[in-house]
Image (cartoon, rainbow, N blue to C red):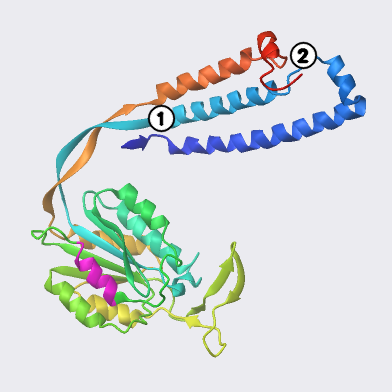
């Protein structure tokens, strides 16, 4: 397993494309200036030892040096020892609505991004609980099985979008049924399911039966509403620009509204609570309080206990590339000139 100590230094890699662009512009300017000064044959006689390849080679060395030194600052670490540790927690499954209605922008920046932020903030408050993620629209799709890897959970969470499922609608019942299969520990007494949605349920399934079956298996169902009850249109964008608004079969603009009643009923039947997700801080604080009140079950989990620094290899490589850049001259090398590897004669 690889762990990055200082990820913020990765921004330094943005220097590389800037340097490449500046180098290309410089080469274009040089060629135009030289052509104004003399023709190509005369330039070759005036500078017989000038290498066209060496300047590019020197740039490559500099870029590799910058990249290597940047990675040295980031300090990658490799896990060297995997051990089993005892942890206490509850099993939590997040089901996130990714239907098109979640693109409505009545809550900034839109409902889906708000839902993802809520889940991410909840994960930040967890210590040793196991979590799983499910995406659903017209059908439910497993994103991440139950795990203690919060980093992987956030990665899968950020990649969720409204195009990942072709069938539209909001099949809350299917999401609940799929979530019920996630809890693989029969001895776990506290099982929690969070439904993050705008509550627009267009599925033909029976949500009430799905919730009842879940509660019979010891699952507490919480619902988090994202959006506003007054509603908003669904923008259809391309490259971040709104092209049109979603319309129904009659050509009328669709207005999607937060259906708190549906979400409240689900929470009531599921022995949970309904939380309005408009205020992220308040919602997360309430959820943290609810989770802290639950009994924690001890379980075993494997994790890397020892990580070794790897910055020294990148530091050595960076210094080597910069050293090569210093000693590589712009003029042709005599013995390479005889070989004519780059067809520069």
Q: Residue 75 got which mark?
A: 1
Q: Residues within 10 Å of mark 2 (few under 14, many from 20)?
A: some
Q: What residue is shown at x 50% (from left), y 64% (from top)?
A: 109
- Does the rendering let one see residue 85? yes
Tell me if mark 1 has few (under 14), some (14-19) or many (20+) residues whose alpha carbon lies within 10 angstroms of its own. Answer: many
Q: Nearer the viewer, residue 282 or 235?
A: 235
Q: Tell whether 342 sits left or right of 163.
A: right
Q: Nearer the viewer, residue 128 or 165?
A: 165
Which image quadrant: the C terminus? top right
Q: Residue at x 30, y 49 (%)?
A: 150
Task: Report helix, strand or loop for mark 2.
Answer: loop
For the record, the magenta segment spans 173-182
Q: Is residue 212 above or below residue 334?
A: below
Identified at 57% across, 68% down, the residue is 237
Residue 38: horizontal and vertical position, in percent? 91, 24
Determine which residue is flagged by label 2: 49
Residue 340 or 260: which is nearer the viewer? 340
Question: In this rendering, would 111 be left or right of 243?
Answer: left
Task: First in sequence, mark 2 or 1: give its number.
Answer: 2
The vertical placement of 203 against 117, above or below, is: below
Indicate the quadrant where residue 204 lies: bottom left
- Residue at image position (72%, 22%) is 343
Reply above or below: 269 against 291.
below
Total marks placed: 2
């Amino acid at each position: 397993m690889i762990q990055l100590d200082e990820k913020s230094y990765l921004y330094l890699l943005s220097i590389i494309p800037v340097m490449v662009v500046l180098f290309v512009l410089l080469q274009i300017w040089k060629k135009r200036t030289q052509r104004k000064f003399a023709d190509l044959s005369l330039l070759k006689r005036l500078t017989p030892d000038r290498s066209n390849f060496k300047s590019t080679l020197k740039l490559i060395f500099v870029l590799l040096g910058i990249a290597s030194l940047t990675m040295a600052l980031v300090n990658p670490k490799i896990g060297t020892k995997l051990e089993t540790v005892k942890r206490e927690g509850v099993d939590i499954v997040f089901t996130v609505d990714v239907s098109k209605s979640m693109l409505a922008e009545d809550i900034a920046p839109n409902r889906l991004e708000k839902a993802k932020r809520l889940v991410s903030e909840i994960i930040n408050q967890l210590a040793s609980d196991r979590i799983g993620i499910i995406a659903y629209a017209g059908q439910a799709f497993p994103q991440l099985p139950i795990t203690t890897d919060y980093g992987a959970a956030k990665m899968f969470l950020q990649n969720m979008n409204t195009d990942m499922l072709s069938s539209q609608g909001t099949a809350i019942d299917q999401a609940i049924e799929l979530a019920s299969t996630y809890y693989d520990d029969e001895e776990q007494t506290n099982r929690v399911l969070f439904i993050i949605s705008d509550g627009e349920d267009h599925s033909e399934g029976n949500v009430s039966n799905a919730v009842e079956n879940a509660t019979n298996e010891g699952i507490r169902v919480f619902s988090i509403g994202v959006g506003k009850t007054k509603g908003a249109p669904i923008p259809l964008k391309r490259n971040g620009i709104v092209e049109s608004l979603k319309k129904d079969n009659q050509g009328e603009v669709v207005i999607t509204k937060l259906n708190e009643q549906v979400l409240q009923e689900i929470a009531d039947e599921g022995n949970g609570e309904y939380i309005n997700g408009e205020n992220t801080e308040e919602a997360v604080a309430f959820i943290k309080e609810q989770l802290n009140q639950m009994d924690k079950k001890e379980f075993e989990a494997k994790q890397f206990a020892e990580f070794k620094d790897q910055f020294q290899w990148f530091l050595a490589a960076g210094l080597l590339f910069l050293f090569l850049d210093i000693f590589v001259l712009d003029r042709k090398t005599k013995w390479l000139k005889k070989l004519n590897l780059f067809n520069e004669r």
